[in-house]
Image: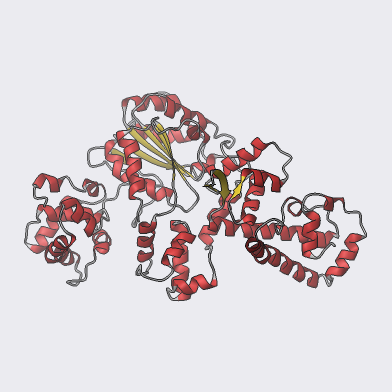
Amino acid sequence: MVSNLDNFDRLFPEAAQNWDLARLYADLETSTGKELKPFEKACLRGLLCRYRPGQIAFKFAWTSGTLRVELNKGLYRSLEALTGNPSNTLKWEHIGEWLEAKGYKVSFQHQVGIQGNRIDWGEAPDIPSFFGRVEDISKLEQWIGNDRCRLAAVWGMGGIGKTALVAKLTEKVQAQFECTIWRSLRGAQPLSQLLEDILPFLAGGNLQGAADTSALLELLKTKRCLIVLDDFETILQDGELVGLYRQGCEGYAQLLERIGSERHQGCLIVVSREQPKEISTHQGQDLPVRSYKLGGLKRQGALELLKARGFSGSENGLEVLVEQYRGNPSALKIVATTIQDLFNGNISEFLKHTALALGDILRTLLYQQFERLSDLEKDVIYWLALKRRPVSLANLREDMDLQTSGSELINALESLRWRSLIEKVTEQDEVMFMLEPVVTKYVNKNYIDEISKEVNDILTNRSFSKIRLLKSHALVEDRAPDSIRAIQIRLVLKPIKDKLAKSLLQAELTADTLHDILSAQLNPALQDGYAETNMALLGLWW
């Protein structure tokens, strides 16, 4: 057993970054008339950092049973008395919210830190509940603390939890820095405007001369400062491959280059849906520039999130749910609410009716990301959604019948990977590409909507002259396995035909009549790509 006082005192020091421990200890002792034991203080700090009792017991080298006995006869009862809650009602998960309600949580906005470090949290969110990510935070702490990284990117698809992760990371490491500042770039402000904002704070009000990149580097040579730039993708251009900056924001490229290459004491963390090109080209495991792609929550973290949403953790279908949404925290929160509201918490019943549900929040996140794509990236992603299985570069190029060079397709795939929209897998030593299920569902709906617009244009103008996707993309693959073809017919072809039938009914036309009108014209557009086959599948040509 751990018995040395110093050993207990060294455990869970990060709790002091979020909680007024001195006042909390004093109030607990006053309310009970008993002095808190060193192990009780350590337990309290651990619980406030959301360590489970079993994890704390491991740190103590105690058994879980021994720790629970000690907590139930001592600390838990003291906390109930302090917070005015009934005896024997405390669960460890509630300790933080009970004590926060009593005012023991510290506000960090523009405050002086525990060791005199100055902090400006800017637009950083407060994260009242946080699940999993122990390995993610540990790795990033290693990069920032031990490896002294100068520049790091944390990137991943929308809703995956990047901002929450970096906020928690910053809370843990900010004591290592003389000053810490957090800014969001969602307003796409030019670099000069950002530097005019942050440099006076970093310099402690003693800034002399111009507020430019050189001034920032000179300051970082004398001070250890942490700078977090969130929403970095908003200063990158829409409609182009990843890496190009919006007009007026080009200075950020030089900022990243210089922060990563010049000697200084600072650290810049970039949080983005897209990996900045300057980081991807200079990163390395032994270099001061690092890149961390954030994936979904692992099983335990995802289950903890779902438990916080009212599930017990033993429901049938829980593991399937986590896998289908790839541990995406936003997606799991959305679908958990849907299951609780519409299916009384019955996951199996939900899965019978729909494999995937996209709430408004997740749909908006995917829309924002999809609208940033170039035309070639959209063409690639439509094909991947249609195929619903991993596909090789060679097969994709063949199906797309590209007139562009092979390098352009490779660039588009790499750009989509940097945008966190495609997954790369290896099958029999061959690299393959595919979409996550959530992305597939969103893109499939988009694909159907765009094809339906082209079909409506044919109906309105009685002409094939303006079709594009109907020429460049198949509705059903000839060479696909039967099981995939059946899915394509059900999820792509049928919805489009159903919409066409409604449009024909409204126009008081039949498919045969429209076919006769169209066949009386010369239709050179049908000679391109998949047009003639698609028209035949829709019943407009034969």
> Residue 518, how many percent across, how many down?
88, 60
In this figure, what is the number of numbered marks? 0
Q: Position of residue 309 (x, y in %)?
A: 38, 66
Q: Is residue 400 left or right of residue 312?
A: right
Residue drawn at x 53%, y 43% as measured from the top left = 429
Write the residue at 50% across / 49% down. 157
Residue ID at (82%, 62%): 460
Asked whether residue 23 appears in the rendered view, the answer is no
Taking depth in this image into account, of 509 and 106 the one nearest to the observer is 509
Front residue of 388 and 137:
388
Which picture quadrant has residue 143?
top left
Where is residue 80 shown, x and y percent of the image?
18, 66
- Residue beneath the point at 73% across and 52% down: 469
Q: Quadrant of the C terminus?
A: bottom right
Q: Is residue 414 above or below residue 324?
A: above
The single residue placed furthest to the right in the displayed view is 520
Q: Is residue 87 left or right of residue 17?
A: left
Quadrant of the rendered structure where residue 249 is?
Answer: top right
Type of colouring = secondary structure
In the picture, measured across the screen, residue 75 lies left or right of residue 91, that is left
The correct choice, above or below, for 379 with respect to 64 in the image is: above
Is residue 12 visible to us here? yes
Seen as rendered, the residue at the extreme bottom is 344
Placement of 541 over or under 259, stated as above or below: below
Residue 290 position within the rendered picture, expressed as x and y whole percent measured from the top left: 42, 35
